[in-house]
Each structure stands twice: as structure tokens, then as C-alpha cells.
Amino acid sequence: MPDCIFCRIIKGEIKSDIIFRDDRAVAFPDVYPKAPVHILIVPIEHIPSVAELDEAKAAICAHMVTVANRLAREQGISESGYRLVTNRGPDAGQAVLHLHMHLIGGKEMGDIA
Ligand code: AMP
Ligand code: ZN
């Protein structure tokens, strides 16, 4: 998707400090971090949001969780704890219409609901 900011990061057209990349996903720091650790895990395929995942496509979600767990260990927050969040739609505040998972941690977080 030519106008998608995350597709452009994946293609290297917009600079970002890619901290993980394989054939299915990339991860890079959120530009406006909401916690000491705030990393985005993003599938290489342009999928607008979690709502487009069905049983056949949900394997990418398992991969994103696996990548997030690995990064949490690397960032030293596996034991202190972390939150994995994916936003879908306006009420959730989804700003970038390319599926992504926020890995957030490094501080105590309040309830979100
Ligand atoms: P969401 O509200 O779930 O769609 O989250 C989108 C996230 O992308 C926000 O937390 C933004 O701070 C982040 N973001 C937007 N542009 C960039 C960028 N160029 N590099 C890294 N993170 C970004
Ligand atoms: Zn995209």
C-alpha cells in the first residue's frame, strides 16, 4: 500500500530503527513511546487490522506474539510484565491502518477497562 506509513517503513522508504525482521514481520520502536519499552510488531503483509484475520490468516497473530515475547525477554521486561495491545477502529484509537501489536512495559500500568 503506497500511502501506508508502516508499509513504507518496511520498505525502508521511511527511516526507523528496525530491531527485528524476518520474512513475516518487523519490529521497531514506537515514535511516541508511552512507556520505557514501547515497540510495534508489524506484519510485512498489509492487513488493515485484526478484524481482517480469520482462522486461516490468524497464524500471523501467533507469530507476532512469539516475536513480542522474544523482544520482551531481550528488553528485560519478561518478568516485570508487559502488555500486548492491538487497536481496531476509531473507538480503540487506531491511527495506522496496518495491523500492529504494541509491546508496552517497563513501568506499572493501570487498568485499561
Ligand atoms: P495505533 O493507535 O494503535 O494505530 O498506533 C499507531 C502507533 O504508531 C502510535 O503509537 C504512533 O506513535 C506510532 N507511529 C506512528 N508513526 C510512526 C513511525 N513513523 N514510527 C514509529 N511509530 C510510529
Ligand atoms: Zn501497510
Image (tube, rainbow, N blue to C red):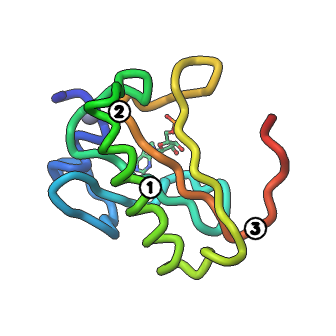
**Disc 1 Cβ-to-ligand 1 distance below 8 Å:** no
Q: Which residue is drawn at 43% across and 22% down?
A: 51
| Residue type of the residue flagged with mark 1 | Val
Task: Estimate how packed mark 3 is, as few (under 14), some (14 to 19) or many (20 or more) residues with alpha carbons within 10 Å.
Answer: some
Marks 2 and 1, how far apart in space?
A: 16 Å
Q: Where is residue 11 shown, x and y percent of the image?
A: 15, 49
Between circles 1 and 3, the one closer to the viewer is: 1
In this figure, which residue is indicated by the disc labeled 1? 65
Report the front residue among 24 and 46. Answer: 24
Q: Which residue lies furthest to the top in this view?
A: 90
Q: How crowded is mark 1: few (under 14 residues within 10 Å), some or many (20 or more)?
A: some
Tell me the SS state at disc 3.
loop
Task: Tell me what residue is drawn at x 15 percent, y 57 percent.
Answer: 23
Q: Looking at the rendering, in which quadrant would you find the C terminus?
A: top right
Q: Name the residue under label 3.
A: 107
Point 59% across, 56% down: residue: 33
Q: Residue 55 carries which label?
A: none
Q: Is mark 2 on a helix, strand or loop?
A: loop
Find residue 43 and report its image quarter. Answer: top left
Tell me the distance, in whole angstroms, between the alpha carbons under discs 1 and 3.
20 Å
The mark total stands at 3
Hey, what amino acid is under mark 2? His
Label 1 element class: helix
Find out whether the residues at labels 2 and 3 contact each other: C-beta distance under 8 Å.
no
Q: Nearer the viewer, residue 42 or 61?
A: 61
| Location of residue 106 with respect to 5 vertically, above or below | below
Q: In the figure, residue 17 lies in which quadrant?
A: bottom left
What residue would you read off at disc 2? Answer: 98
Determine the residue located farthest toward the front in the rendered image. 55
Residue 105 in the image: above or below residue 4: below
Q: For the residues marked 2 and 3, what is the alpha-carbon distance in whole angstroms?
A: 27 Å
